[in-house]
Structures are given as C-alpha cells and as structure tokens.
Amino acid sequence: MAKRRATWLALALPVAATVALAACSSSSSSSSSSSAATSAATGSSSSAAASGGLKTGLKVFVIPKQLGNNYFTTADSANSGGAISALNTLGESGTETSGTAATPASQIPAIQAAISKGANALIVSATDPTALCPTLTSAMKRGITVVTYDSDAPTCRSMFINQASTAQIGTSEVDVLAKQLNDTGQIAIVSAAASATNQNAWIGYMKQQLKKYPKMSLAAVVYGNDDPTASTQVTQGLLQQYPNLKGIISPTTVGIAAAAAVLDTAKYRGKIALTGLGTPDEMKKFVSDGTVKEFELWKPQDLGYLAGYAAVELASGKITGAQGQSFTAGKLGSFTVGADNTVLLGPPFVFNSGNINQFNF
Amino acid sequence: MRAVLSPRRQQRPDESGGRTGSAALAERVFRIRESGILVVLVVFVAITAAVQPRFLSATNIQFVLVDTTVFALLALGETMVVISRNVDLSVGSVLGLSAYLSTSLFGPHPGIPIVVVFLAGLGIGLACGVANGIMVAAGRVPSLVVTLATLYIIRGIDILIVGGKEVVAQSLPSAFLEIPKATVFGIPDLAIAIAVVVGIGAYYLRTFRSGRDLYAIGSNPAAARLAGLPVGRRVFTAFAISGAIAGVAGVLWGAQYGTINSTAGTGYELQVVSAVVVGGVAIFGGSGSVVGAALGALLLSTISSALYVLGISPFWDQAIWGFLLLLAIALDQTITERLTSALRKRRTRHA
Amino acid sequence: MPSLTDRPLPELLRPALRWETGLAVVVILILVIGSAASPDFLTGNNLFNLGLSNGEVAIMTLPMALIIISGEIDLSMASILGMASALLGVLWNKHWPMPAIFVVIALVGLAAGAVNGLLVTRLRLPSLAVTIGTLALYRGIATILLGPNTVSNFPTAYTNLGVNAVPFTANDMTYSTLIFIVLAIIFGVVLHATPFGRSIYAMGASAEAAQFSGIRVKRIKTILFMVSGFICSLAGVLWTFRLDTSVQNNGLGLELNVVAIVLLAGVSIFGGKGSIIGVVLAVLAFAGIQNALLLTNFNQEATGIVTGALLLASVFLPNAGRWVRSLSRT
C-alpha cells in the first residue's frame, strides 16, 4: 500500500509541477508574449531608419517542407545565397527549422516552436495546402508575418512567392518535350504524391497545353510519391503498359532522377525522351550520357532570397501584399505582386548540356 | 507418454539435427511451403500475363528481378534473426546509413575500387549488426525494443551526418551504376548473385550446427539453453549477419538509384518483415527458410509490378497488398497447424 | 518466452513501480533542463502547443499499452486513424450530418479492431504479423476512399476543437489533453482496480494459465482490439479537425511512436507488466524532449537519437541490477 502511495506521489509530483509552473507562467506568459511582441516591435522600430525603411533585428524563421532535402537546403541557407543570406544582408536574424518527414505533423511543431520563440515573420513551404492553416492563421492573428514559398497554403498567408507561374511551368514542360519529339508521340507523366497541390496544378496546365499538339497524346499520369522505389516501379510499369511511349515528363526532382536511372540503358536512352523538373547536380550524369536532353527548374536560392526580402518588406509594413504593389529584392531587382498576392520569381530556367556545368546545386 | 519413457528409442530430439523421422518430415514440409509460395507466384504471374502479355517481357522480368534484389537480401538477413525468435527492425536505417557513407567515398576518391566500397558498406552494416547483437544477446533484452531503438538512433545519426547533402549519379563511376543493369542471357547478374547467396544461406542453415541451432533457439529458447546450445553467440551472429547484409544491400541500393540522401531506406523494415512472413517464416521463430523468404520478397515485388503494369488504379495498391499479406499469414498458419498435428500424430504412432 | 507465471501478481508490480519512479525523475529533469535552456519552455502557450501536437498520439498509447500488456501488439493503429480521417472527409463531402458521420466512424473503428481481434484470437495468427497486414489494408482503404482528394472545409465549430483551449483553463489545455486525462483515468482504473484489468495482466503473463483459470482470453483480447479501433477512430477525428484536413496520409507512421512511448513506459513487450502511470509519464517525457529540443535549436535530427536512447534505457536499466548480480554470481 505504501508502495502504491509512493507511485501516486511520483506521478502527482511532475504533473503538479507542470501545472503549477504553467499556472504561474501563464499569468505571466500572456504578458510575456505580449511583451515579447512589443519588445520585438520596439526593438525593430528603434532601428527602423535602416535600408529604406525596412526594420532590422527581426526574428525570421524559414520553415521548408523538411530538413535534409538538398533543394531546400539550397533555397534556405546563407552559403548558397538563399533566404538566410538575404535576411543577413538586411540585418535580420534568420533560422531554418522544420521536421524531417515532409508531413504537416512533422512541420507544425516547428512552426509552433518558432512562434513560441517570438518570431516576427515565418517563411513557409507548405507540406499541405490546408493542414497548416489553423496554426498559420493564429500566427497571423498575433501579428506575425506569414509568407509561403515554393508550395502554397492559399488561405492562410499574406503572400506567396512562386518559383514561376503555375501555368508557365505546365506549358513549358510540354513545349520542351514536344520540341524533342517533333510534336509527335505518346507521353506520360510521372508525378509525386497524388494529393500534391502544385503537381496537380501543373499537370492541369500540361493537359491543356497538349491540346495544342494534336499528334501528341497523354497515356497516363502515375504517382511516385517522391519515393525512389515507387517512382522507379511506376516508370517501369509505364514502359510495359505503353510500348509506344515516346516521352515522359516528371515535374518532381525525385521522380525525374528515378526515371532517368530507369531509362539510362542502351534500350531506352534517346528512344524515350525524358524531361521535367530536376536539379542540375542530380541530372548532370544523365545529361552527359544523353538520357535527358533538356529539363527545367529555377534557382532555389533565388526563390529563397526573394522570399526573404518579401517577408521583411511585409513585416516592416512597407507593403501589404496586395496586387500591384512592388518592391526591390536586393540583387534580384524589382518585383510586382500579382494576382492572389503572388510574386513570381521568373520563367523556369531550361538546363541542357550547354549550361549545366555552371551550376552546383 | 510411452515415447518419453522408452529409453531404447533411437529418435534424437529434433533440434540437434539428425535425419530421423520427424525432422525429415519437417524438412519435407518446409520444402512444400516453399513450393507453395512458388505455386502462388507462378499462378499470379500467369494471371497477370494473360491479361497483359508484356508483363512477361524480358525487360519487365529484368526490372522485377532487380527491384527485388535489395529486399531479397534484407529478407535473407531478417530470416536468420526471425528464426531465432527475434526481429531486426533497424534494417532500413542501416541500409540508409550504409548507402550514403559507402557511395560518398566515390566523390573524393574517384579511382577507388568498387570492391572497397562494397566492403565499406559491409563494414558499416556489420558494425550496426554487432551493436544490435551485443545488446540483444548479452543484455538479454527483447530484440523488438532494441532494434526499434536502433532504428531511431541509426536514422538520427544518418540525418546528422548527411544533413542536406546527397550523393548524385555524376559522382558514381559508370561501372558501379552498371551493376544492376548487367545481364547474362537476359538474366540480371544481380539476380544470379542473389540466388547464389540465398543458396549459400539455405545450405548454411540446413547443414551447419550453428545454422540449425537457430531453429532450436527459436522453437524453445529455454530448452536450447538447457541443452547447452551457445544461445548468446548464435543470436549475436544472426544479428551481425543481418546487419552486414543490410550494409551490402545499401551499396546496391546506391547503384540502383544513383541519388542517395538521408531518406534512403525509410520504412523498409515493415516491408521486409512482410516479405519474410509471406515467405513462410514463423514470426515466433523455429521454422522457415531463406529460400521461402526470398520467394516472399519476389512475390511481393511481383505483385507491386503487376498492379502497375495492369494499370490498376494506384490507389488500390496498398489495400491489395495488405489483403494479400493477411491471406499469406493465414495460409501459413493453417499449414503450420496441420504440420504440427501431423508431427504429433507421427510421434505417437511411433511410440 | 520467459515465463512470469511463477511470481504472484503483487511481486510483479514491484519492479514496474521502480521504473515508474525513475521515469518520474526523468520527467522532472526534462522540465528543469528544458526551462533552464529556454525561457519559452514552460509557458502556457508552449504547453498548449505540446498538447496539440501530441494529443492524438498520447490518446493512442492507452489502448496500445493494454494490448501489449495482454501479450499482443497493434501496429495498425495509425492506419485506423487514417481510415477514420478519410471517412470523415468523404462523408462530409457528401453532406452527411456530422452526428451521423461520428456514428459511422465509431462503428468502423470498432469493426477494424474486431477484424484484428478475430484474426488474432480465432485464427490464432500472430498479432505482429496480422497488424502489419491490417496496417497496409486500412491505410489502403483510406487511400481508396479519398483518392487524391483533400477535404478541408470542416465547420469551425468542430475545427475549433483543435485550435481552442478548454474554457476555464487559462488558455492552456487542449481538448485532446483533456480527453487524454479523462481516458487515462478510466483506463487506469480499469487496468489497476478491476478484475478485467487483472485478467489482462494474467493473460499477458501466460495465456494458457489464464485460460485454465477461467479467464475468457479470446473475448477479452478481441474487446481490447475493438477498444483500440474505437480510440484510434476518435484520434482520427481529433486529428482531422485539428489540421482541418482529411487527406490519405494523415497519421502516417505514428504507430512506431506509439509503441516507443509505451515501451518507454516500462510496459514489457512480452506482456504481463506495465502501468498506466508509466504511460502518462512516458508521454510527458517523449513530448517534453521533442519540444525542448525544438525550442533550444538543438539539432532536430537528434530527437530520434534521444528517443532511441531512452528506449534502450527502458530495457537496460531495469535489467542492469539483475545483470550485475548475475555477473557477480558466475
């Protein structure tokens, strides 16, 4: 009996401690969080005179879909000239944080922690278009600037920094492939997750653009879930199901890398054209041996850099993100906000054997 | 009762191996189980090929065989562990760590012999397997907990080391990337190599004392200990082998996909356990064969490929896989129970 | 399997009790170190976020603990969560009234658990293998139901459950935390103070002995699986409302976290040993560590390592004393 009482005490103690401390701090937390906000505000407004009215000393958190992903590391880090490099230039404090699983459940705690740590602005690549909204909306209610980049959460941010116009990505992918196929032939699409917003949006435009090429047809859209094994198997399945397949578009870096590895044999190299969105480093081998002639992407570091500037402009109150406003993003020049509070980085960049070796990401 | 009491009986206990009646029957039934999986495989392939003849094209067969390679290897190592009534959940993480660390050697050392890279992978896997083995064998703690922990720890170490980096095909020598593509008479070299390795594994388990001991340990660990079997050493070896195999599988993974980052091998453990179970290895140990497990991996891979080739909506994939897995488990259990009762009847008959 | 049938039940509890005390110390340590390392750790706001992020996982650890104590395991839990979430989305899209949807989801959860239970008890299939199969099957059903779609227009009355605090708790307690506390009390009472609970321990220690002493092992195990299914459905509903999103991969991969927490709680994987107190403490420890690491900018990749290390500690420390003693004996 004494033992059982001991355990109840053992349980009660930490729980009571937690509740007590929480109660003590909650009365002060509401004041501390508001004081954090005011101190951030006063802290930054005291140095507001800097660079054309932009605040300095802001705490900005860059939250990609996941950590450990080469594309995002390039987009975010200071070394590559990404988001944190822009933030450093502007005199803000930039930190990259996220989960490791590219799911909302993995990303949300990182967002919440950033809010707890007194973030003034969040730059987020959304793992899901809606699942982050309750968290992001409550952040915005507390006066935190929320900007999305790379992957949008349309209903809960002030601005979206898009790598290129969704329509343009879709149409140019088809155009690039059509050029290689002389406008003739059956093609297929190897996508990522079936529920990925950006993928489905691009595919929608691809289907539309295909109508301009009456001698080309779309055999199938398959989903590799951004997993190398699944992407490989769906590509192999395509090759068996459609013996007359002439081209494949894979608008996802994992998908195109996997498909390239499958096609990189004497049997398929050059016979089936492959294009899509890939990173130069991953594609170098396949471009040099002819498996892939041309593919597209943009410079992730420019995307991050632009997002950094946009977030600071918003947080400083210089723009509200409304359509038609414009701002300067350092070395990238001037940008104007388009429809749906979206800023476009620019047209997708076409990589081929002629230029690929100039890039290292 | 008379069987226990009569000392003149020649029948030695099954576990120390001897080709007496019950052991021979058991072996025959294991082979029947393996042929059972083979039959299911053949039937499945036949049905799919009837609907879509290109499923049996040379290219597709090559695809399926190569795709199965990594899982067949992992299943081989996992079988040894499961037979001894343990489980190794860390294989996916070990594969991932080995895949990155070994293939990253090519970048700064372009002339490095491929064999060295394979040895590096083997070494990394072996180190992880040894760690698992020591904890399970010496610590006498449940392997499910230990390998679940090392699953987390090894993946964490992998992510810490790799960060946002990745190994790309550009830095890998063509000879390395050709390994999964090389064929002889249309059969992938890798498939032949795996078949040979599985054969060696099967021979080892069936013939060598240390192999057969694993079955004994799996059937009844307490009895095995009492009978003087070096349980700790055997279990340790099983984990060490499982780790080493996972390490080699990691290198092959790198050759197959060409792009390696910190996510390689995530989630593989449940697939490998599925393959092993489908292959007729009892999850509680004591029975099963590596040939069965390899066939199980092949069957699951074939099903995956078939679904894609048949164009069945990809959204049905996982449900079908899960259903077939349950079916395989149920079938296997029925066979086990029939076998056990047959063995019991035999023993009493001889009494 | 090592048999614990020779020891009477109260003796069984003693080593377990010692682990719980150790775990309590760990939790206090985490509180102290966490708050020292980061001023934001013990704020009400942070605790609220903790509750949000971990609520569903915490709720799922309770039935998992009972199932493991009874000698089985249920790896399909996260998939049942996903299936419930998918159903919620699909039916809501078809304009079913929410109360009706809740009933359907509850029934489906019970059915999913029943399937697990029947396969394990009637067909005598090993639960580890079975629930790996149903993990895939139920996730697959979720995928078939939703396809590529995402449903996210749930009424705010419900999504507020995932965002607002329970009234009268100074904005600190999430609904999921409240549900967890209530369920923990219920499960705790059932497990530790009822014959039903004692029979769970008994069958975990030895299913045969329990059967012979008149305990209806099959029925109880099936009930446990059904309860698990129901609770996971509940977790699925909470999850969906919290994220305001019903998508096929909701909850993917959570089962290993749940198992890890339950093992951390000192529940033996062999069955027959463990306590709800341990589970509650383990939940606090697990969530606390993840959160402290996040707040202190400590390498987030390290959370896995810390979790793994704790798991190892959970099996080695209790054995350590016994091991040292056995070494000195040889």
Image (cartoon, rainbow, N blue to C red):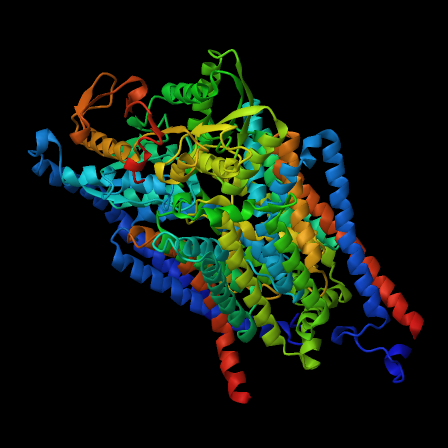
Rendering quarter of residue A59 = top left
Residue C293 point in image, percent of width and height: 33, 54
Q: Residue furthest left?
A: A49
**The C terminus of chain C lies in quadrant:** bottom right
Q: Nearer the viewer, residue A110 or A345?
A: A345
Q: Is residue A117 above or below residue B231?
A: above
**Depicted A108 relative to depicted C17: above or below:** above
A215 displayed left or right of C305: right
Q: Position of residue A26 (x, y in %)?
A: 28, 48
Judge by depth and name the residue closer to the eye, A123 or B304. B304
Q: Is residue C62 visible?
A: yes
Residue A178, placed above or below residue C288: above
- The furthest residue to the bottom: C329
Residue C74 visible here = no
Q: Quadrant of residue B226?
A: bottom right
**Residue sitting at x 47%, y 17%:** A182
Locate residue C133, reporting x and y percent.
65, 47
Instruction: Please report the residue visible at 60 percent of the width from the left and 67 percent of the height from the top.
Output: B238
Residue B68 in picture, x, y percent from top left = 61, 47
- In depth, the one of C239 and B330 nearer the eye is B330
Residue B273 placement, left or right of A87: right
- In the rendered image, the vertical position of residue C122 relative to residue A150, given as above or below: below
Q: Seen in the image, is B157 located left or right of residue C296?
A: right
Residue A84: quadrant of the picture:
top left
Q: Quadrant of the N terminus of chain C?
A: bottom right
